[in-house]
Image (spheres, rainbow, N blue to C red):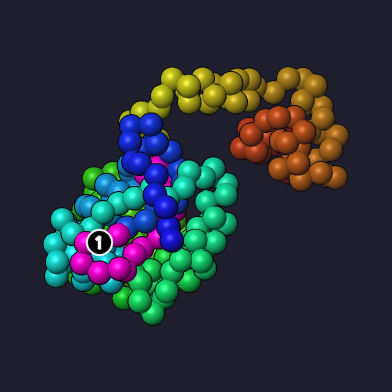
Amino acid sequence: MLEFIEYNDTNRYLSGIYCITNTVDNRIYIGSTQCFKRRFTEHLKDFTENTHNNKHLNNFVNKYGIDNIKFNVVKLVEIDKLLETEQYYLDTYINFDKDFNICKIAGTPPNYNRSLSEKEIVYIAKLYNSGKSCCQISEILFNHRNQRSKIAKITKGESYSEYKDLFNYRKYNQTGRKFKQKTKNKIGSANKGSKVLSEQNKVFIKENLTNISVRKIAKVLNKSKSTVAYYIKNNIKDGL
């Protein structure tokens, strides 16, 4: 039998395994998350908007109401062990003929190849136009980022073209994105001196360009590939 950990201010931002139970029958849903608070909020939002990608859970909430479900913390797990641990709990505790879980393999979004409804396309447009990236939308809609290319095709009108006018096309960049000071320091340290090539660097590039790829040269010099490529294009005739 599953044992639960009290969900509190101490663990709400931690990663691990969670379980959704209900007060009507014995069916459960088991999942994993990098942040309990964020994942529980996403579930509640999807239930409220009737857009949850798990049809069993969505139908249950539509029938019995959101007050009849409860979120429970099962186990605190490091992020790199989440899928492995989730798979153990799926194999051990879930009856796929009875419980809410659809996917038997941890990390696989349910029905990701299905056609999307008009309501879902409108929801994607709303998220995209509010500044969400295709990765973020994929995670919100499918609980997995591996469908980001599918979202990108929709936003560009390459698929579901009849809805392309819903999307305000934008070229994604980092402008306006807010970072914590700790992140800013890391970015600064990583970029420090990366755009400046010393004379020694330039000599190394000229001597090794015909034998080593630009990517490897950049790695050896601890410079960005674009910095090395720019120097080659503008300072070495015909790239030789």
Q: Is residue 2 magenta?
A: no
Q: Is residue 91 visible?
A: yes
Classify 182 as above or below 34: above
Q: Is residue 64 left or right of residue 84?
A: left
Task: Using the image as rendered, state which of residue 188 and residue 194 is in the foreground.
Answer: 188
Task: Report the residue at 42% width, 65% height from top.
Answer: 109
Task: Locate residue 10, reporting x and y percent.
Answer: 38, 31
Task: Using the image as rendered, state which of residue 118 and residue 142 is in the foreground.
Answer: 142
Task: Locate residue 185, reporting x and y percent.
Answer: 51, 20
Q: Amino acid at mark 1?
A: Asn
Task: Report the residue at 67% width, 30% height from top.
Answer: 223
Task: Locate residue 35, reporting x and y percent.
Answer: 40, 42
Task: Locate residue 26, reporting x and y percent.
Answer: 30, 68
Around disc 1, counting alpha carbons within 10 Å, would you say few (fewer than 14), some (14 to 19), or many (20 or more)?
Answer: some
Q: Is residue 143 left or right of residue 162?
A: right
Q: Which residue range is magenta in the image?
A: 21-36
Classify 130 as above or below 99: above
Q: Number of labelled discs?
A: 1
Image quadrant in which you'd find residue 122: bottom left
Q: Which residue is mark 1?
A: 22
Q: Is residue 13 left or right of residue 195?
A: left
Image quadrant in which you'd find residue 60: bottom left
Task: Report the residue at 33% width, 36% height from top.
Answer: 8
